[in-house]
């Protein structure tokens, strides 16, 4: 990571996109919110973009239909130097997924996928998520130490979504490897990532083909079956949809479990309160607590790319047609204009309309699954390993340097071994 950024940086402005910033971006965001709430900066990739940091502006921008998700509206894309999107994706023909399209295509595809990926289907999946969670904890409980990212937060969502999609168990470790490649090199060398995306695409295309012949009760079969006014997804659309479910539902959930556990370990009073509530069979603090963990240190630091389809203003700032706009969810969710004591973790917080899942038509489709996984993972960890603690100094922890996501590379812990 480097920072050629901010040609127009004010002398008092904390630097963006350094390693120090990756460890704790909140002071820099507080500065921007106060002094430059809609701020143009040069990203480490060399692309210029506007950062929107106040809650009110962020919420408005997320729902603003004049901001397109389609990269063809990027002024730089027209010059062939657009550097946005998933590496390898352009060639992989997976571009037409929900996060890259606008109405009316978005409306049609989202309605179709919503028929297959229903809250009810997610709820039915709860026992399986519990089983996966317990199985992963069994893997390290007797040792007394673990890296909760690699051994827990990382495998749980990948196995969960593979199960839901209907990827057979014997193929799921391939997904684990491909996903590992994508998460490790998200912002780095592109060759390996592009290869992993390509393998996933080929695999999904074959799986969809097979499921068309022999449908089951899984989500892929549901995607193929889903119809709206007689309309169905094409095989290509179904593959892009399966891919976006994997892609959007994977690293986000890793970070919810990782950032969430870390926040609890750093806030012992809150953690004890939650442990006490769980011991008494009271899950209400867990429910508000997951939302608070999403607000306090959520998995998605910046919402995905948006591009101005015409000149417009956000928070009084003029944005030119073709300019990219990045809504900084992590900054908006700490805005003191919206949240009382925003830098305090309060698991019982109720007035908590955070933007961690976005807002408007692109609001997270996977929120029910994310909540299920987050609640199950954290509650089970705290119940089974009640004296869980960090085994390194927090200053030694490293955060991934990607632009969009915020998450830990490792989370080394220790606890009383339970054979
Ligand atoms: C969209 C966050 C888990 C699937 C989004 C967006 C956010 C988000 C912020 C909107 C991005 C934008 O507008 O730029 C999260 C968080 C998660 C999580 C914090 C975990 C804690 C999941 C899971 C799935 C999923 C588990 C599916 C399995 C999607 C999809 C979209 C989306 C498909 C695109 C929706 C659309 O464009 O209509 N998510 N997500 N997410 N999420 Fe999630």
Image: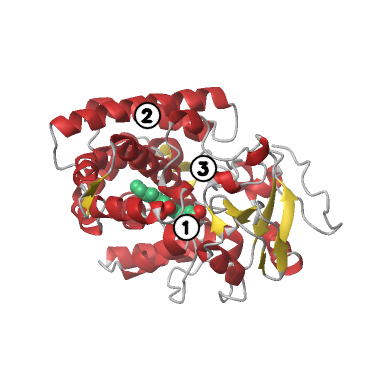
The reply to whether dot 3 and dot 1 touch (C-beta < 8 Å) is no
Q: Which mark is residue 201?
A: 2
Element under label 1?
Answer: helix
Q: x, y percentage for residue 302?
A: 57, 53
- Pick the residue in front: 329 or 411: 329
Q: CA distance from mark 3 to mark 1?
A: 14 Å
- Find residue 418 and report its image quarter: top left
Give the total of numbered labels: 3
The reply to whether dot 1 and dot 2 touch (C-beta < 8 Å) is no
Residue placed under numbered mark 1 in the picture: 264
What residue appears at the point 39 percent right and 46 percent down from the top-left corner? 249
**Mark closest to the chain's N terminus, 3 or 2:** 2
Residue placed under numbered mark 3 in the picture: 391
Q: Which mark is residue 189?
A: none
**Mark closest to the chain's N terminus, 3 or 1:** 1
Element under label 2?
Answer: helix
């Amino acid at each position: 990571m480097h920072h050629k950024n901010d040609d127009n940086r004010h002398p008092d402005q904390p630097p963006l996109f350094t390693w120090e910033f990756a460890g704790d971006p909140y002071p820099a965001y507080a500065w921007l919110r106060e002094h430059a709430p809609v701020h143009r900066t040069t990203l480490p990739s060399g692309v210029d973009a506007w950062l929107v940091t106040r809650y009110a502006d962020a919420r408005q921008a997320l729902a603003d239909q004049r901001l397109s998700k389609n990269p063809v509206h990027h002024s730089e894309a027209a010059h062939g130097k657009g550097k946005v999107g998933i590496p390898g994706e352009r060639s992989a023909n997976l571009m037409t997924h929900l996060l890259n399209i606008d109405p009316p295509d978005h409306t049609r595809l989202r309605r179709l996928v919503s028929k297959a990926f229903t809250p009810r289907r997610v709820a039915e999946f709860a026992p399986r998520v519990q089983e996966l969670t317990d199985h992963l904890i069994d893997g390290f409980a007797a040792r007394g130490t673990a890296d909760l990212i690699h051994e827990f937060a990382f495998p749980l969502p990948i196995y969960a979504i593979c199960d839901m999609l209907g990827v057979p168990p014997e193929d799921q470790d391939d997904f684990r490897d491909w996903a590992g490649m994508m998460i490790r090199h998200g912002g780095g060398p592109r060759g390996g990532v592009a290869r992993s995306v390509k393998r996933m695409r080929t695999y999904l295309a074959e799986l969809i083909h097979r499921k068309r012949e022999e449908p089951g009760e899984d989500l892929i079969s549901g995607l193929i079956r889903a119809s709206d006014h007689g309309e169905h997804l094409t095989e290509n659309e179904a593959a892009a949809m399966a891919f976006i479910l994997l892609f959007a539902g994977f690293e986000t959930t890793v970070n919810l479990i990782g950032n969430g556990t870390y926040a609890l370990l750093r806030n012992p009073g809150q953690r004890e309160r939650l442990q006490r509530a769980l011991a008494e069979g009271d899950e209400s603090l867990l429910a508000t607590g997951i939302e608070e963990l999403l607000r306090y240190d959520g998995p998605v630091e910046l919402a995905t790319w948006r591009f101005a389809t015409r000149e417009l203003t956000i928070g009084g700032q003029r944005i030119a047609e073709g300019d990219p706009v990045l809504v900084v969810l992590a900054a908006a969710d700490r805005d003191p204009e919206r949240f009382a004591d925003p830098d305090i973790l309060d698991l019982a917080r109720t007035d908590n309309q955070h933007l961690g899942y976005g807002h408007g038509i692109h609001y997270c489709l996977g929120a029910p699954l994310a909540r299920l996984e987050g609640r199950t993972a954290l509650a089970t960890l705290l119940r089974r390993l009640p004296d869980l603690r960090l085994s390194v100094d927090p200053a030694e922890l490293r955060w991934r340097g990607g632009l969009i996501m915020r998450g830990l590379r490792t989370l080394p812990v220790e606890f009383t071994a339970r054979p």
